[in-house]
Image: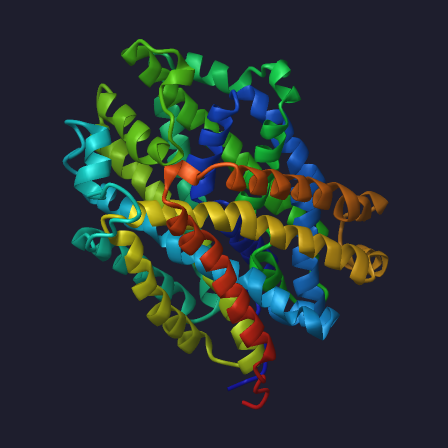
Amino acid sequence: MSNKRDRWHSRPAFILAAIGSAVGLGNVWRFPYVAYECGGGAFLIPYFVALFTAGIPMLILEMGLGQRLQRGAPGAFAAINKKLEGFGWWAAGLSAVIVIYYSTILAWAWVYLYHSLKLAWSTDVDHFFAQEVLQRSTGPAELGTPVWYLVVGMLLTWSAIWLILRKGVRNVSKVVMITVPLPLALLALMLIRGLTLPGAIDGISYYLTPDFSRLADPQIWLKAYGQIFFSLSLASGVMIGYGSFLGRKAEITNSALITGLANCGTSFFAGFAVFSMLGYLAQIQGLPVPEVTTSGTGLAFVTYPMAILKLPALQVLFGLIFFITLLTLGIDSAFALQEAFTTGIHDKWKVSSERLAMGFIMIAFPISLVFTTQGGYYWFDIVDRWVCDFGLVIAGFLQCVIIGYLYDIQGFRKYLNSISEIRLGNWWVWMLRFVTPIVLLVILVMNIKTEFTGTYNDYPRWTTNLGGWGTLILFAVLAAFLAKASGKRKV
């Protein structure tokens, strides 16, 4: 096998792949829900502040680090200091965890896509999601058995990931030409339909009108920074891995700016489509817009299906459009997350793309079946909370410290300026050394305080210890093992 590193077909292919990784389910269901929970327009101000003070600076850092060192996260941090290879494996390992439980949402979307043909949730959308789709048990302590059609949805998801990744990033370059523009077109169709519905303007008004008094609430700012990190796939090795497949003279800064703006622009655009539907739903239910929904997951699988059901016409068509949108958004992020981890394995052991894709899936698919059980929803919730609120925050903080203080960041800035269309000033260094790590440290302290002063969603403490802290510790041990393992450079 050749030692030659995979390359993107072109700069547009790289940018589309980076956008595809960043633009995912979080743009359609997580961003609108967080915005909704934080008062609509009041959330948009800290969200865009977070984009320019943390999101884009971190994107430049990660893409540039991968491109300069020509390695995924484990190899890149090992190049900085051999002792840091374990951190690189841990960050990339978070991607592996995320894609394993993230596949659950895609399995749900496959099931809903099938049921959209007959609008099977027409009797009671809450009951349909909880009992007929998930067959949900009473709690995480009651795991139950796998639900067969969720297993089928999971199988379809992993099969799609394998078909895309088995030929490496060159195949990804072709796939993103379809999977990135398609959901944008579908979102546009949903927005056009939503704007024609009565009450849509009320929803849009709630979305765009800021309550400036809420900006004094630090939780809104912390959630804005958290959403930026989650949405842009930061601190998980994804963008370092994608950057490593660029040529040594490839442009970085403008590419990162385009990716960040495209991602957040998509979230902003999706907000119009979702809030127009929420305004319509609020009017037909006789409720104020803030009282329509109370669940992030429910926004995609309860509230939106309910809104589709209430449409005066073309319910089946818009049901199909919505869940196809979820699937195309989700699959891009899923294969990017897997690639972040397997790139590190390829760099160290030179395993082929096809063997890597198959090997990862042979391990990940059986583990993901836990989330298809009757108690799987609760374990999905636990693992998601700990990975996002603790794992990614810790990884992001340590990454800023490593690059800001243990790496020649000024030399790195000069290097990026030598190959990029937009020159970076000292503001970039200040963001990475001070603003971003301080914000992440505050988020981490507040999350730890919340964890140790109560129980998450009233789950038994042993379940959160096992699914939350246990998952993070397990991958820390695995990261240490992979860092100490000998690489095989001969091919």
Q: Position of residue 89 (x, y in %)?
A: 57, 67
Q: Tell me if residue 417 comes above or below residue 90 in the rendering.
A: above
Q: Position of residue 133 (x, y in %)?
A: 20, 42
Q: Is residue 313 visible?
A: yes
Q: Tell me if residue 297 comes above or below residue 290 in the rendering.
A: below
Q: Where is residue 274 in the image (x, y as percent from the top left)?
A: 40, 27
Side of 133 where 238 appears, left or right: right
Q: Is residue 73 visible?
A: no
Image quadrant containing the C terminus = bottom right
Q: Tell me if residue 483 comes above or below residue 275 in the rendering.
A: below
Quadrant in the rendering for residue 12: bottom right
Side of 421 where 229 appears, left or right: left
Name of the residue lying farthest toward the bottom: 490
For the image shown, how many numbered marks are present on the structure? 0
Side of 336 where 130 appears, left or right: left
Residue at 67%, 32% (x, y): give it: 49
Q: Position of residue 302 (x, y in %)?
A: 29, 31
Structure colour scheme: rainbow
Q: Tell me if residue 297 comes above or below residue 409 in the rendering.
A: above
Compare residues 93 and 465 and report the one nearer the observer.
Answer: 465
Compare residues 115 and 259 and report the one nearer the observer.
Answer: 115
Side of 354 where 109 appears, left or right: left
Compare residues 435 and 469 and report the one nearer the observer.
Answer: 469
Residue at 46%, 58% (x, y): give it: 470
Residue at 42%, 50% (x, y): give it: 383
